[in-house]
Amino acid sequence: MDRAAESYVKLVLAVGQHDPDYVDAFYGPPEWKVQAEAAKRPLADLRAEAERLVADLQAMPASGDEMEQLRHQYLTRQLQSMVARLDMLSGKKLSFDEESQALYDSVAPTYGADHFQKILDQLESLVPGDGPLPERIDRFRQDFVIPRDKLDAVFTAAIAECKRRTMEHFELPPGESFEVEYVTGKSWSGYNWYKGGFHSLIQVNTDLPIYIDRAIDLACHEGYPGHHVYNVLLEKHLVRDRGWPEFSVYPLFSPQSLIAEGTANYGIEVAFPGDERVRYEREKLFPLAGLDPSTAERYYEIQRLTGQLAYAGNEAARGYLNGTMTKQQAIDWQVRYNLFAPARAEQRVKFFDQYRSYVINYNFGLDLVRQYIERRAGADPAKRWEEFEKLLASPRLPSGLR
């Protein structure tokens, strides 16, 4: 297994020479990266080697404890995903659902316009003002934008609270840390770049207005107990303690991403169960941002409903990537059914162009992780933290969550 794992890491790095988005993180031996950069291997050679490794693993019976068996399944499926990505880089066309199954071990459910319209109908009576609902919701949200000069103070406070809550339940390695950087010109709103050594760089995109709810969303999702903690626990428990080199590299277009994004989103609910989030934001973040705390409950009542529109983005991506929607139709769909401002809808189509079916990892990943944890923990907050940590530090696949 260790030989196959080393070959897998080197293959991921080699694929990264063809696909600049493929290698999301690497903190293994530096000479492996140098070797990959020294010679750009043909896609056909990489595919043939990946298929040989899959065949070798399938001929090798899984043995040992549950973690060893999960490791075997994980490595096999990650390599199969790599084969699919290499086929795509070679020009093979897949439908949205075929692609998500091949890359992320999952297919998200499909919803029609009627599903989203029922949610929009509920919002009609809640959102004040006159005119079309998307315009009204955009005007309503303007009162909840974090002023640019207060952004860092709000994020710093949100990160500190997310970390405090996480450290009450998790024991993280000494010295773990991350830094925050504000950037522009990206297709995403936030990104965690894990550097190894228990350290991350978190970038926040300030191209568009940042609403007050994004402070906790990004602090949890990118930091504690989300991506930063996920990567720290993998490095500590699997790379350092067990010596499994395959976890020193993270191929973005792979089943690992559904686990990463799903746990990062569910981590928000774990850290702030029930009404704790609204209470904390009303008492701490709204005043820090210079916003009216008395409006917090109303804001989150509307946010709860707009959150139920999340799968509308999948439908826009599915239609756009399958060729049944033009770019403008995908933008218009998101304005109508996601209630996005046009600029945000356009930014999201840029995300579709760059990351394609990756969008399912956020909402469907959240649903799979939530169902998996809550089947085991029920409504017990402490038990949820316990099961959540186990999942973060294990090589479980999306298909293993069902």
Image (tube, rainbow, N blue to C red):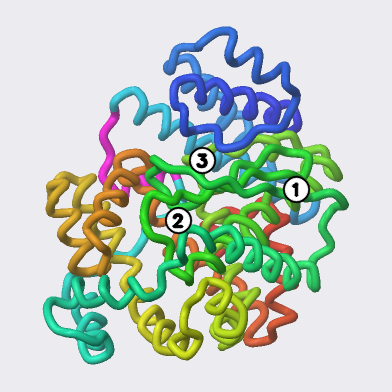
Dot 3 falls on a residue whose secondary structure is loop
x, y percent for residue 331 = 19, 55
Amino acid at pointer 1: Glu
Magenta stretch containing residue 94, yes or no? yes
**Badge 2, how many Cα within 10 Å: few under 14, some, many 20+?**
many
Q: CA gap, disc 3 to disc 1? A: 23 Å
Q: Is residue 294 left or right of residue 239?
A: left
User: Residue at point 72% right, 65% down?
Assistant: 163
Determine the CA span between mark 2 and mark 1. Answer: 25 Å
Residue identifier under label 2:
361
Answer left or right for 303 relative to 92. right
- Distance CA(mark 3)–CA(mark 2): 11 Å
| In the image, residue 345 above or below residue 306 | above
Disc 1: CA contacts within 10 A as few (<14), some (14-19) or many (>=20): some
Q: Quadrant of residue 244?
A: top right
> Where does the magenta region start and end?
92-103
Nearest to N terminus: mark 2 or mark 1: 1
Task: Give the residue displayed 82% in from the left and 38% down from the top.
Answer: 243
Q: Which residue is mark 3?
A: 252
Kindly identify which residue carries mark 1.
68
User: Does residue 274 appear anywhere in the picture?
Assistant: no
